[in-house]
Image (cartoon, helix red, strand yellow):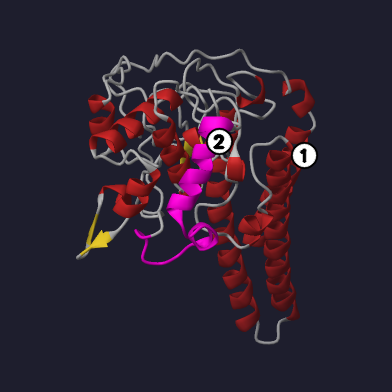
């Protein structure tokens, strides 16, 4: 019956994931470094990969995408098997209700319900094993509670991070960029430095201030989608992937509608499919250009500009996380309520400390 089917499928999932885990050391070989010149498929559009395979158009595929594919299949399977389990329990309950004293029907009803519950538990066990595998290999933060509580969109948050064993762009997340992109030192408040030598020190300090309040202050921030999903470092096109009604991306969490204007104004080169190259050094250049064009070139002017005026936002409030822009404080604004002071702390790094060029 249905309960036996759930039990069998659950056991198959558990065995399958164990078999998958065993050969993983064989895969633990560094991948060949990928180019970062923006060789996207001609004619591809950001965010068009809506099938099972989430790569090949806006970015190159990596070994990490195998885990994304398995994650998506598992997530689909969870919904399917959960539905079958509920159906089996209903059928088991009907057997018991219509048994009319027939002990055979009662036993069969309880058996169906038991098998459904056990099968669903086996499926969850396989999901936890897969989640543990992702954590062990560096593809996911330890977030087992998301699996147990079925948090929407948070089952197996595969984060193709480049510090992992399956790095496609070189060791330690160094990437291929030679100018800009924060690939160097880390300064105050554990926020990565801006390496571009053509950006004024105070503007660099503002850039780091923005990334701190946006919650993407490390180098990985350049490859972060809203909601803390990560993409490979060879990504050169805005992913335009909507999370919580926003497609913000990168160290400065730029929208797909904002990025082209800023990139064009900064002279950012285009990929072969006509989109602007959103590699780290170009993210720095585009936002730095916007700040300078709007006369937000000092820490004091940045903090003064971060204000609401009669229900509208000033230019600095492109980032609502900045103190003065957000209506409701978050943990970062509560800890660092003075944006000017934070910016000046970063400025010291730029002039005399860890971030001096």
In front: 142, or 346?
Answer: 346
- Residue drawn at 67 percent across, 30 percent down: 164
Relative to 247, is 84 above or below? below
Residue at the extreme bottom: 101
Label 1 crowd bin: few (<14), some (14–19), many (20+), radius 10 Å: some
Kindly identify the residue that appears in the image at 55 percent across and 23 percent down.
Answer: 62
Q: Kindly indicate the quadrant of the structure image that contains residue 117.
A: bottom right
The numbered mark at residue 138 is: none
- Locate residue 30: give its quadrant: top right
Residue 236 makes an appearance in the image: no
Residue receiving disc 2: 349
Badge 2 local density, few (<14 within 10 Å), some, or many (20+)?
many
Q: Nearer the viewer, residue 12 or 154?
A: 154
Horizontal and vertical percent position of residue 239: 39, 34
Q: Nearer the viewer, mark 1 or mark 2?
A: 2
Query: Residue 254 vs residue 78: left or right?
Result: left
Residue in front for this viewpoint, 351 or 70: 351
- Element type at mark 1: helix
Determine if the magenta segment contains residue 347. Answer: yes
> x%, y% of residue 253?
40, 42
Residue numbers of the magenta segment = 324-352
- Asked whether the residues under the numbered discs 1 and 2 touch, taking CB atoms below 8 Å apart as contact, a structural biologist would say no
Give the Cα distance between marks 1 and 2. Answer: 49 Å
Label annotation for residue 18: 1
x%, y% of residue 343? 46, 45
């Amino acid at each position: 019956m249905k309960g036996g089917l759930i039990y069998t499928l659950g056991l198959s999932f558990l065995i399958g994931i164990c078999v998958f885990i065993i050969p993983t050391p064989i895969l633990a070989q560094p991948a060949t470094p990928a180019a970062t010149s923006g060789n996207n498929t001609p004619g591809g559009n950001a965010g068009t990969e809506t099938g099972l395979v989430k790569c090949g158009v806006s970015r190159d595929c990596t070994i990490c995408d195998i885990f994304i594919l398995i994650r998506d299949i598992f997530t689909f399977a969870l919904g399917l098997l959960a539905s079958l389990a509920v159906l089996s329990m209903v059928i088991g309950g009907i057997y018991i209700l219509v048994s009319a004293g027939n002990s055979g029907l009662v036993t069969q009803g309880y058996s169906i319900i038991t098998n459904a519950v056990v099968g669903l538990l086996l499926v969850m066990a396989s999901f936890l094993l897969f989640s543990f595998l992702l954590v062990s290999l560096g593809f996911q933060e330890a977030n087992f509670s998301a699996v147990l509580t079925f948090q929407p969109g948070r089952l197996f948050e595969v984060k193709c991070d480049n510090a992992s064993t399956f790095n496609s762009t070189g060791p330690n997340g160094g990437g291929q960029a030679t100018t800009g992109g924060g690939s160097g030192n880390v300064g105050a408040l554990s926020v990565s430095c801006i390496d571009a030598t053509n950006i004024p020190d105070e503007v660099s300090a503002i850039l780091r201030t923005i990334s701190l309040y946006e919650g993407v202050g490390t180098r990985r921030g350049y490859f972060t989608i809203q909601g803390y999903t990560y993409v490979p470092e060879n990504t050169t096109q805005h992913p335009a992937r909507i999370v919580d009604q926003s497609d913000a991306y990168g160290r400065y969490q730029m929208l797909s509608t904002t990025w082209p204007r800023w990139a064009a104004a900064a002279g950012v080169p285009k990929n072969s499919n006509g989109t602007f190259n959103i590699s780290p050094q170009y993210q720095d250049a585009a936002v730095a250009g916007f700040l300078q064009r709007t006369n937000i070139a000092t820490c004091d002017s940045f903090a003064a500009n971060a204000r609401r005026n009669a229900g509208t936002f000033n230019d600095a409030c492109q980032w609502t996380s900045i103190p003065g822009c957000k209506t409701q404080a978050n943990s970062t604004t509560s800890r660092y309520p003075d944006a000017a002071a934070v910016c000046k702390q970063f400025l010291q790094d730029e002039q005399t400390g860890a971030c001096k060029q």
